[in-house]
């Protein structure tokens, strides 16, 4: 069995276990498909993960290093200046924890007693001392990326809003405006020559986290229930499972 997939993980990692948290990605799964969320978190069997995107992780890592240089100097970044944005990368004593996968920004939701978590990519601040959530994205498409109008961007927007909500629960004053630093690999070069160049754009997004509280309560209700909820629509995993079941009979 692949080291990336463990269909029978230890109960500690399931809902009610000592290591379980409602991460940002789990909440997104609940929104996408309550059935998969329940099978994963309550019954402990999750669908196989995608293979890790190591190139995306490398780009995230390098962007973090690049913005950290400017953070250390207390100055803005050329990309921020190019877009005329009132912001600079900022220090916070918890930033390293908040950026760490499987730790992130945490908050224990009083009504459900669930710990909600999500790891941010970066934190900036504006001249009104409002913190700004920043998320890095990487892709390689032909069009210049300046808007968030594709279907998969809806998840990116929710991601931003959950981070804004989490930081607000941690008593930070957070601007509704967050930013995506979008690195788009240039496929028009004559040859690879061992390097890939990127266009980097900065996209502002006005977040609205008013839905988060209800989503958390709904996810909690789902986990407290004793029946498997309905699946979401248009899922290739379930289509595959159904197709395989039919041909095997
Ligand atoms: S529809 Fe997809 S997401 Fe939902 S239970 Fe099936 S595999 Fe999981």
Image (cartoon, rainbow, N blue to C red):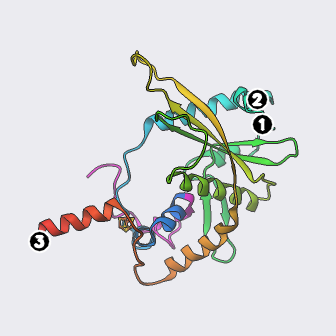
Region of the chain picked out in magenta, as a range: 1-24
Tag of residue 249: 3
x and y percent of residue 242 in the render?
A: 24, 68
Label 1: which secondary element: loop
Name above or below for residue 88 compared with residue 12: above
Q: Is disc 1's CB within 8 Å of ligand 1?
A: no
Q: Is residue 13 left or right of residue 122?
A: left
Say which of marks 3 and 2 sits in front.
2
Q: Is residue 177 left or right of residue 216?
A: right
Counting residues from the start of the chain, the first of labels 3 and 1 encountered is 1
Kindly indicate whether the residue at mark 2 contacts the one at mark 1 (C-beta within 8 angstroms).
Answer: yes
x and y percent of residue 68 in the render?
A: 69, 31
The question of residue 6 being in magenta is answered with yes
The residue at the point 43 percent across, 40 percent down is 53
Which residue is disc 2 drawn over? 81
- Give the spatial CA distance, label 1 vs label 2: 6 Å
Tag of residue 85: 1
Tell which residue pokes out farthest to the right in this image: 128
x and y percent of residue 220 in the render?
A: 56, 76
Badge 1: how crowded within 10 Å, few (<14), some, or many (20+)? some
View quadrant of ligand 1: bottom left
The residue at the point 63 percent across, 48 percent down is 120
The residue at the point 44 percent across, 23 percent down is 188
Q: Nearer the viewer, residue 191 or 170?
A: 191
Tell which residue pokes out farthest to the bottom in this image: 226
Counting residues from the start of the chain, the first of labels 3 and 2 encountered is 2
Label 3: which secondary element: loop
Label 2: which secondary element: helix
The residue at the point 54 percent across, 51 percent down is 153
x and y percent of residue 190 in the render?
A: 41, 16
């Amino acid at each position: 069995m692949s080291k990336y997939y463990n269909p029978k993980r230890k109960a500690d990692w399931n809902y009610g276990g000592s290591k379980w948290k409602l991460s940002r990605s789990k909440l997104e799964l609940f929104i996408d498909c309550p059935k998969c969320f329940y099978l994963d978190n309550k019954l402990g069997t999750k669908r196989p993960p995608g293979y890790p995107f190591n190139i995306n992780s490398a780009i995230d890592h390098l962007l973090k290093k690049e913005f950290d240089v400017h953070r250390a100097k207390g100055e803005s970044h050329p990309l921020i200046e190019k877009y005329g944005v009132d912001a600079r990368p900022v220090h916070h004593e918890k930033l390293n924890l908040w950026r760490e996968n499987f730790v992130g920004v945490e908050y224990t939701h009083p009504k459900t007693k669930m710990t909600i978590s999500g790891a941010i990519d970066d934190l900036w601040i504006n001249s009104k001392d409002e913190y700004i959530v920043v998320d890095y994205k990487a892709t390689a498409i032909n069009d210049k990326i300046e808007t968030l109008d594709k279907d998969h961007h809806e998840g990116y927007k929710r991601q931003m809003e959950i981070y804004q909500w989490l930081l607000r629960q941690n008593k930070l004053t957070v601007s509704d405006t967050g930013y995506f630093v979008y690195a788009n690999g240039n496929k028009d070069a004559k040859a690879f020559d061992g390097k890939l160049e990127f266009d980097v754009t900065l996209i502002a997004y006005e977040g609205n986290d008013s839905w988060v509280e209800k989503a958390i309560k709904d996810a909690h209700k789902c986990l407290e229930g004793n029946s498997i909820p309905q699946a979401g629509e248009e899922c290739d995993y379930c289509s595959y499972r159904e197709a395989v079941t039919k041909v095997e009979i």
